[in-house]
Image: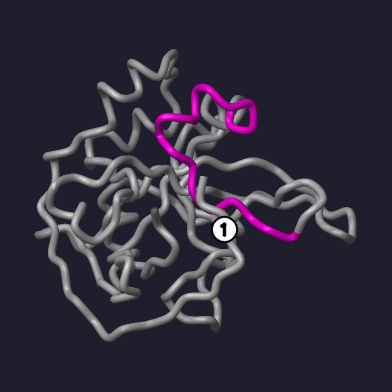
Amino acid sequence: MCGRFLVPENLEEFLIKNSIRKEGAITDDKGRVKYPSMLVPVIVYDDRKKDKKLMVMKWGWLFSGTKKILINARNESIFKKGIYKDSVKNKRCVIPAEVFYEWDDKKNKYTIGVKDSPVIALAGLYKTFIDDKKNLYDAIVIVTQDSNEELSTIHQRMPLILQDDDIETWLHYDILSDEEFNKRFVKDKAFSFDIIGEQRESEQLKISFE
């Protein structure tokens, strides 16, 4: 799963390298560590201008009739469950991260990055919601897959990480089936990780992992 990540310190370099423009203010006063329900930087494809742009969206989809939020979407489910139907076809996004954080079954915390990659491109989906004041807002979930061998001793799931040459395809090209999706994007051995163990930490987030 993915329940917390760090916004890249050198995000501007990543944007320039990948020809991504910024739309509106991106920075905030809550720091670079992002939790569910916070505003996070997100890359989407702008059909009108035919380019990629960085904007902010809320992390987590609201369940109808409850205050719980869905923060992850399993790669096995996104072509099969109705909640993802429109998003997987038309509203795919990329969440830039420097590292992500994971906890094992003993609540030990790990900081996980990709070797030689200062920015990790996490695959995501987004959709539009209406808040209590009848205002529209966009929110994201991060797509996850089975952990590779290197991470499986920490947790059974990991975020789906895109290689640089897959970002453009993920954002706006037609993906017609789960077979095509898994063949193109789910790559168990594509990355080697830097893993740093930290102190024991208890998490009490009111979130749901799909």
Residue 167 percent location from the top left of the image: 32, 38
Instruction: Look at the image and say whether residue 68 sits in the magenta stretch.
Output: yes
Q: Which residue is mark 1?
A: 59
- Model colouring: one colour
Residue 199 percent location from the top left of the image: 27, 86
* Residue at left offset 74%, top offset 60%: 67
Residue in front for this viewpoint, 125 or 202 = 202
Residue in front for this viewpoint, 36 or 199 = 199
Residue farthest right in this picture: 133
* Residue at left offset 52%, top offset 40%: 125
Q: Seen in the image, is 46 located left or right of residue 99?
A: right
Q: Seen in the image, is 114 located left or right of residue 156?
A: left
Please, what is the three-letter code of the amino acid marked with disc 1? Trp
* Residue at left offset 52%, top offset 48%: 141
Range covered by the magenta-colored residues = 67-84
Residue 64 percent location from the top left of the image: 78, 46
